Image (cartoon, rainbow, N blue to C red):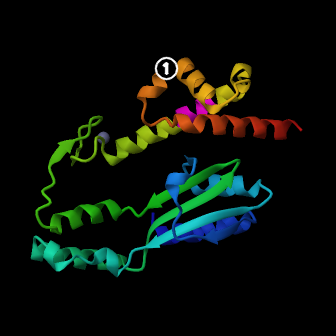
Amino acid sequence: MDLDNLEQEIRQYASKKEVSIIEATALDEEKVIDFIVNDYPEIIDLASQLDKKIIIISVAKFDEENLEIKEKEIGDRNKAEEFKREFKKYLGKNLYIGLYCINEGIVFNFHVRAEWHLEFVMKKGEVLKSEELDETSCKECGTEIFVFEEYCSECLKKKRKAGEEKTKEVAKELANNNEFSGLKNDAERKLFIEEKYPDLKDNEYVRIGQITPLAKAFLNSQKRKNN
Ligand SMILES: [Zn+2]
């Protein structure tokens, strides 16, 4: 999907739902408790139910800087020329879109990169000097990938998705668990989660730290519905 069109779609959908959009160039994503959603309507629908109907959008465009390779870094001059010719057509197009909605201390977010981004990164790697990329294969499906990854991007996506689902599932269960609600602090809650769900610790795609705030959010939204 073309991200310029997607941005249009997002803006139209937000306006239909009477949700305002704030522009941001970058968010400090390290500092937030986040929750990734699958598609942009989820974020906008959520915002439309809140008192302040606001989402944050962050769009990065593909610019000259992305195409630039320092003279001393070029390994293969022909490939460098070819690379520039090939990706010049994307100048000014959207490279990345991030959407954020903050609720109950959780930043719900949706990210998407242009389909050609991975190819761009790989081809740029081929142009650069001495960076010999060794190939290896995805642990899940055997597709050839580069050594710095364990899984191919498709399998990684599936793993992350499954992790998100599991995180949600556990949080929902715990939202209605009286023993869990009675715990006094995060340390006790962490211990409780680890004892009740011992297999979560080995799953790096489940975010244990998100379970407690999510369980609280689920509980609050249930209370609101019942009122
Ligand atoms: Zn794979």
The image position of residue 129, as x and y in percent, is: 12, 67
Which quarter of the figure is the N terminus placed in? bottom left
The image position of residue 143, as x and y in percent, is: 24, 43
Amino acid at pointer 1: Pro
Which quarter of the figure is the C terminus placed in? top right
Task: Determine the image quadrant of residue 213.
Answer: top right
Q: On screen, 92 above or below 163?
A: below
- Quarter of the displayed picture in which ligand 1 can be seen: top left
Label 1 crowding class (10 Å Cα cut-off): few <14, some 14-19, many 20+? few
Q: Please state which of residues 142 and 26 is positioned toward the viewer in this rendering.
A: 26
Q: On screen, 58 above or below 220?
A: below
Q: Residue at x 41, y 45 (%)?
A: 157
The residue tagged 1 is 198
Q: Please state which of residues 200 and 1 is positioned toward the viewer in this rendering.
A: 200
Q: On screen, 166 above or below 5?
A: above
The image position of residue 109, as x and y in percent, is: 57, 54
For the magenta stretch, what is the residue range?
165-171
